[in-house]
Amino acid sequence: MSSEHKEISIAEFFEKNKHILGYSNPSKALITCVREAVDNSLDACEEAGILPDILVKITKVSENTFRIVVEDNGPGIDREHVPRVFGKLLYGSRFHAIKQSRGQQGIGISSAVLYAQITTGKPAVVTSKVEGGKAYRFEIMIDTKKNEPEILREEDVEWYSPHGTRIELEVRGSYVRERKQSVLEYLKETSVVNPHAKITFISPDGEVFEFDRVSDVPPEPPKEIKPHPHGIEIGTLMAMLKTTKARDLKNFLKSEFVRVGDKISEEILQKAGLSPDLTPSQLTREDAERLVNAFRETDLLPPPIDCLSPIGSQLIMKSLMQEYSPEFVYAVTRKPKVHSGHPFLVEAGIAYGGSLKEDKVSVLRFANKIPLLYQQSGCALTQAIVSVNWKNYGLQQSKSELPVAPMVILVHVASTNVPYVSESKEAVATVPEIIDEAKLALQECGRKLKEYLDRKVSIQKKKKKEEELMRILPLLAEKISEVVEKEMVDPEKVIARIMGKVYVSRAVNGNKAVVEISNFSNSRKRLRIYEMCDGGINGNRTAKWDVEINPGETERIEYEFSGRHVNSRPLVEGIEKELVAGAEVVNYEYGEEST
Amino acid sequence: MNMEKKALESLLSIAESIYNQLKNGEIPEIKISTRTKYNIEFNEESEVWVYGDRTSTRTAKTLKGAYMMLRMAYVMGFIKDQLRINKSSTLRELYYISENWGLAKFDDQSDSDRLIEDLEILTAFQREHFHIRPEEDGATVIGPVRIREETRRGVREIHCQEDVGEGGYQIPVNVDKLEFVDHDAKFVIAIETGGMRDRLVENGFDEKFDAIIVHLKGQPARSTRRLLKRLNTELNLPVVVFTDGDPWSYRIYASVAYGSIKSAHLSEYLATPSAMFVGIRPTDIVKYKLPSDKLTEQDIKALNAILTDPRFDTDFWKTEVKLQLDLKKKSEQQALAKYGLDYVTDVYLPERLTELGVLKA
């Protein structure tokens, strides 16, 4: 029996269990490889404060083999780190750091390298260059027995880029087009939540898709923080106790945790019944447990939030606007909250109508700026969306389903520790705090949407009413003139009065003319009147008058003229065409000074 | 013809006012009496209910008002043409004619009927003066009265018992053109339902009691009400109204006796204030143990509306309506058949008419 027990390396384990990390089928595997590389690029650029410019190119090698190239303008990777970053699983700079990042476990890109190696036998080709240095190229495989990189080739190369990293992988996969779960969709969604990134994608069909940046400001890189006492697991705590440099328990708490100062550490220790002078490494499991319980019983400030890097409501709106050209867009960034000691925050945005025509809501889910393409129904963010009563906001919705509307709903959760349902980062676990926050964010978006829709309806109604009145009143004038057998009466002034416009009329009597300007609107108006006569007005061919007129008032201009009027109706300037009746609106330069 | 000319002048003065408002750049508006039960008041002199001082303003500022005025302009033009060539048309024809009026076309005949009533109110003339007739619904008269009618075949004299069949004499549209020649009647009985009218005719009620039987056919047409009014005022005959025992029937009685809310502007011409209510009364349901039906929700609503209707603001009606609300029952005229087919003519009506003083004891 015992002969069958042997140690398996993580790489070997993964080799047999690819599905765990998102390589369960050929199309998904292709997306996952691209995603791991792009996530790394984005993270690296963000940390270095560089505006990302990422090229993704996929070419077809054979029926079911594809070559993936992902190239970025990031800071590059130090030569000595390259083999381990790409050739060893669970190697990473971020595993122990508490801050928001796309990668968390250090599995990502090396798993893609391993997947390529397993399915095609080809090594990963990595080119990198650090600013000021030379470019170097590695061909790397992973020794799965040892979980160590195996360098097949290493050479210096010439590279046009001042700095950056390029990875080439050949993998078995399948390329899907125009589906919710595709490389294109992943990149599109990635660009929505990374508005500072420029992503160019060349598809196997040779098509080029460009996702331009809508922001030239790189996001503030998240700061690293120490663990928060709420939510720390006992095992983690015991490991920290063993390795700390603090000489006594009180200092341990103060130096290894966030939000713990003198007073709080004393309070915790008193609750735990432990002496502040104890040496951390000597604490027993029972002591550690008492400490965890004491943590729970102590009120603490939530963790600081500069470890989070939200997209920001403004940028979400801009991105949605650019990507979907909707008629209405709104986004909310909530204040950070805490779940199990981990700070998190939720952002939500909606894009409605415009070029979104189909009545099917698209859901864009993101965690730490990574698009989540799979397991939509099992995701806390989806649950939050369907738990909102969208009927309150003027949309149709069946119970526990997505609303029916030409709409995109975006939800982003950012956290130092996103509770994914699985390692493949496909869905967020149903943590009540996260669902509540998402719901509040969505409800705010919903309220704004309702305001917009209501306003739209009332404007449409008013416009429709106006159009109808404009048809009825001339007919009324015509018929009533016919019935009383008098000359046709002009309804224009009445229409102007009803519609709240400025009405201008000219009455001529011999060589005298009177121009009347009535302001039926509800604001003060400034405008200029022009009249032209071939025989002259007060000595000139053209005369002008500046008029300022209060709501409800009528101004009169009287003048003498000779000859005939050149302009059939008075000309006015400095006022919008829609606001005037009875006159021609012209535009010289007067409009600029009138506000 | 003189009347028609005056009516037309009055009509054109309304058109004139709209025209002038438009000409002055004012938003056209028309004030018209509010046509609700809250705006009818009792006229002491004529003893009928007429419109009070409340008016509502229709203005072209609103779509509804603008449409109303547009349609009014078309209707005025139509009436003007019609009077000029001395033609007439029915309310229904007018509604169909409006099909050709584009935006001014009516959506529903009730809208065009209502507009004609508006014009009656505004001009104080009747639609007959505009040559707009109702659809004749053929209410009938049977009884000892001889009338003279101008027909298209010349002047005819008709005795409403001897010269007519069981169906009776059919009331024409323009009752004012009838002349009463002579009569042997002692009173007029107006009956809501056809079944009861036939019962009385079959039992020879008109001959036995010298009664003129008028069939109301539900809510009576103007011509029927006008005829009752003329029989009452010109021949000095008392008028009694015999209906079912439910809120809709009380309204039928009210429109005969007090005038209707819809045409309160014509009350003085149409209403017979001295008309008496014979039944069926809620107290009859108890007294005669009449077969009954349960009040529906609409019945209850209508009864409660009657309690706030100024026309029914008398002790008699308050007591009866409240009793009915307590009973939660209503009965039909023909429920009296419970006691046999002759009971109504032999017992119920003689008893009641004696009580009312119409028959001498």
Image: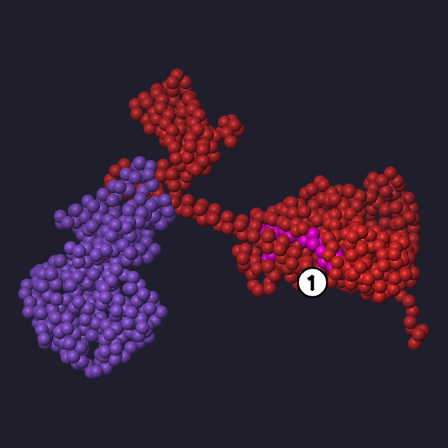
Counting from the top left corner in percent of width and height, residue A110 is at: 84, 56
Question: Measuring 27% from the left and 75% from the top, which residue is drawn there?
Answer: B331
The part of the image, by quadrant, that contains residue A431 is bottom right
Outermost residue, right side: A3
Outermost residue, top side: A539
* Residue nearer the viewer, B32 or A165: B32
Q: Is residue B150 visible?
A: yes
Indicate whether A60 appears above or below A130: below
Counting from the top left corner in percent of width and height, residue A224 is at: 79, 49
Q: Which residue is mark 1?
A: A430
**What color was chain B assigned in the picture?**
purple
A300 on left or right of B87: right
The chain painted red is A
Indicate whether B5 appears above or below B154: above
Q: Is disc 1 placed on a helix, strand or loop?
A: loop
Q: Give the residue type at disc 1.
A: Thr
Question: Measuring 62% from the left and 55% from the top, which residue is drawn there?
Answer: A440
Q: Chain of mark 1?
A: A
Magenta stretch in the rendered image = A336-363
Q: Is residue B252 visible?
A: no
Q: Is residue A578 magenta?
A: no
A579 on left or right of B135: right
Q: How many marks?
A: 1
Counting from the top left corner in percent of width and height, residue A133 is at: 88, 40
Counting from the top left corner in percent of width and height, residue A326 is at: 59, 48
The part of the image, by quadrant, that contains residue A422 is bottom right
The C terminus of chain B, quarter of image:
bottom left
Question: Measuring 11% from the left and 73% from the top, which residue is drawn there?
Answer: B359
